[in-house]
Amino acid sequence: MQPLEMKSVEPKEESDLKEPENLALKGDVTSRSIKTKDLIRDPESNPNTKSAEQEELDHMEKEARSNFATRTLLNHPGVCCGCIFILVLTSLFIMMNSVSLTEFSTREYFVWDDIRVQRNDVVNLAKEDLNTEIYGDNEVPLRIDDQSRWQTFVMYRANNSDNVITYENIKIVRRVEEQITALEGYPRLCQAVSSDDSSCAPYDSVVPFFKDAKNQQDVVDTVDELVDTDYDSVKMFFETSFSKTNRRSKWTRTNFRFATPIFDGHKRYKSSDDDFDGQKEYLIDLYYDIDDIISESESDDLEIFLYSSIWWGETFGNLMLQDFKFVILSIAFVLVYMSFHTWTFFYPFVGMIEIVSSFPLAYVIYRYVLFVKLFNVMTLLSIFIILGIAADDIFVFLDAWKQAGNIPLLQKDFDKRFSCVYRRASKAMFVTTITTFFAFLATAVSDVAPLAAFGLFSANLIMSNYVLVISYFPIAVIFKEKYFRNWWEGLKSRQRQKQSGEPHLDNRKIQKKHSSDGLMNFPTPLKNGADVASPENERVVREDKDCSGHLISTSKKSQGLDACLPSIESERNPQNLDSIDATVGSKQSTCHQPPRESKVERFFETRMTDFLHKFRYVFMTCFLLWIPVGIYMATEIPPLSELERWFPEDHDIEIAIDMHLEGFHQGEEDGKITVELIYGIDGLDRSNLTLEDRYDPTSIGEIDWDKEFNLSPKANQLRLLQICEELRSNTRLV
């Protein structure tokens, strides 16, 4: 190997010995020469003032300094990966053994500190105590406690006409009712006639009025007779347009009543509060059987709908779970897009693992640090949020990695490049993460427990994702860019040796060191196992990269250096700066050139930045003027004028709700409000409840009894009787 000829020149002045500071940097030849020219051509202009390029290099040098995090990740990537894996696996084990979806309940949507909610809780607690006083440890009679939420409606709507009261439709309604009452679970849930008679009480239906009808004319005659003689009793079964003059109705309904406590054939529940959720499960099972009957009984001219508040909650939960199939589509879309953006499947796959790993970490903090038990379907929706946020963080890190490859200072040193990228990307991701974190944390102050729980879990999920994206994902970058790439390039190198006919040597030494580009060199074949520096190994073929990135031998490499690098004399001699520029300019096609930035990067770096800077005061003024406008518009948002729709408008539940609330005449039980007056209560004591109970719908508190209340005096009893008489005589209430 011919040594590179080094020419020395005796400088005439001391200033010629001063080499610019930036020449010590491992940078691009073009950058070195140009900056050398800039600094030497006019040394007396302002020796203390740095050029913009030099300031940028100094800033980049500072950014490229390693810190504790980067040194740990670079020196011990395997240990760090193992620790993260153990942490995630432990959190996943805890989550799988403790997580359970909270049963849907309207109680959890009540405002915790609202006085009306507290009074409702007091009434429920008083009822429980009253039942305990009356029955003690004895069993409450079966199915005597009428549960208003268990009231169930089966509604029928004509499809192709404006009248559901036809002979064929009446037969279908009768058949559906007979099949429902014949179900195995119906007798154990139907409301009892009385405390002494456990047989099923009759349900409300229009069918008994038509029991003698043989044809359509009989149905018409029966309707006429009912309207003329008992209109107030039958109008509740028909739509609001049904009247004495209009004896047609597009829909009708059947009202089934169910009650507690029940006997399931094995266990006899003592009261309604005795495992109420367990008793409710039997009703839900019955609803599924009724739904099957409805599906089989519908005809072209008759649609049938099932509705109750319990069935609404069950359907809502099922719909939310069904929507989770879109999670798979979302993950697939993000995976494909990230693969397209990065031109590799490795980083998107690692990113998906990182996103999924965020959930057990967030749950452990949510459940065992913040002590929040409430974990419903709404909480799971945060996966859609974290998919977008995590993908953005990964793009930020990878784009920073790609852009660092365009910086000459960082191209040749992997550790500096990684440290700079890690420092800058982690700061950028932290800004976006912390703003989103506090946005969801603000939701946690909501008085509605599910919304607050959703905000707390999402905030924890976002922060857990950030911890993983600055620890787990960088390790993946280290493994791929530093180790896997070296292995792959070494494999290709050995393949080229075989194709070129070079001898394959059995005895070799493995030389591992950091090369000029910061990556690790691969095993280099040595003759007879001799030392690397021995003369007999001077002509051993060593592969390296030339300026264009192609693998070259040692002799070609020396030629490339002679062609690309200006002589040391020319760099030390200011008189030859013009020749340096000419040499560099003529050799740019063969020497290393940083990859050009993409059109998008150039657009935001030049045109977009210049445009924003040019009109910065205009934009600032517009935003400042918009702030009070936005605040005013926010204060003018009106409350909901109608019930919020949780289902699509064409969903069976929404159709049933519309018919139930507005589609029927009011019957004797419709539109009535039960008012309960309870005496002797001073309030609700929640002093013993903890933060954990704040998000538990079943944690109500205890009754604070009025110790001075006494109903024994005659005056108190007379006053109570007087209140009852006043309420009974008030025609506005009764």
Image: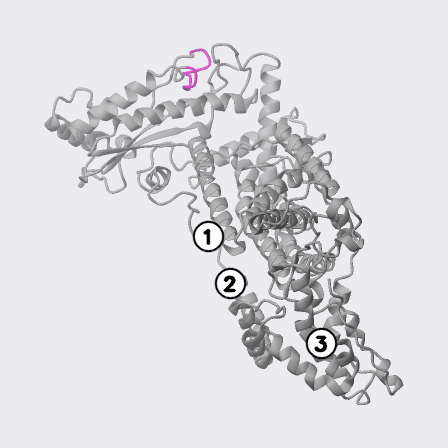
Q: Secondary structure at mark 2?
A: loop
For disc 1, the marked residue is 640
The vertical placement of 549 against 375, above or below, is: below
How far across and how far down the image is residue 621, in percent? 58, 78
Q: Is residue 643 above or below residue 572?
A: above
- Name the residue carrying label 2: 636
Mark pair 2, 3: CA separation: 72 Å
Query: Magenta stretch containing residue 193, yes or no?
Result: yes
Residue 301, by quadrant, is top left
User: Which of the marked residues, 1 or 3, is nearer the chain's N terminus?
Assistant: 3
What residue is shown at x 59% (from left), y 45% (from top)? 350
**At label 1, which amino acid type do we have?**
Leu
Residue 512 in the image, given as x and y percentages of width and height: 75, 49
At label 2, which amino acid type do we have?
Glu
Q: Do callouts 2 and 3 mark residues in contact (Cβ within 8 Å)? A: no
The reply to whether the C-beta atoms of the residues labelled 1 and 3 are less than 8 Å apart is no
Which of discs 1 and 3 lies nearer the camera? The answer is: 3
Report whether residue 223 is seen. yes
Q: Residue type at mark 3: give it.
A: Pro
Q: CA distance from mark 1 to mark 2?
A: 12 Å
Residue 219, above or below 548: above
State the image coordinates of residue 681 (x, y, percent, origin top left). 65, 32
Q: Quadrant of the N terminus?
A: bottom right
Q: What is the C-alpha distance between the residues marked 1 and 3?
A: 77 Å
Q: Residue at x 55, y 71 (%)?
A: 602
Query: Over which residues does the magenta segment extend?
Result: 188-197
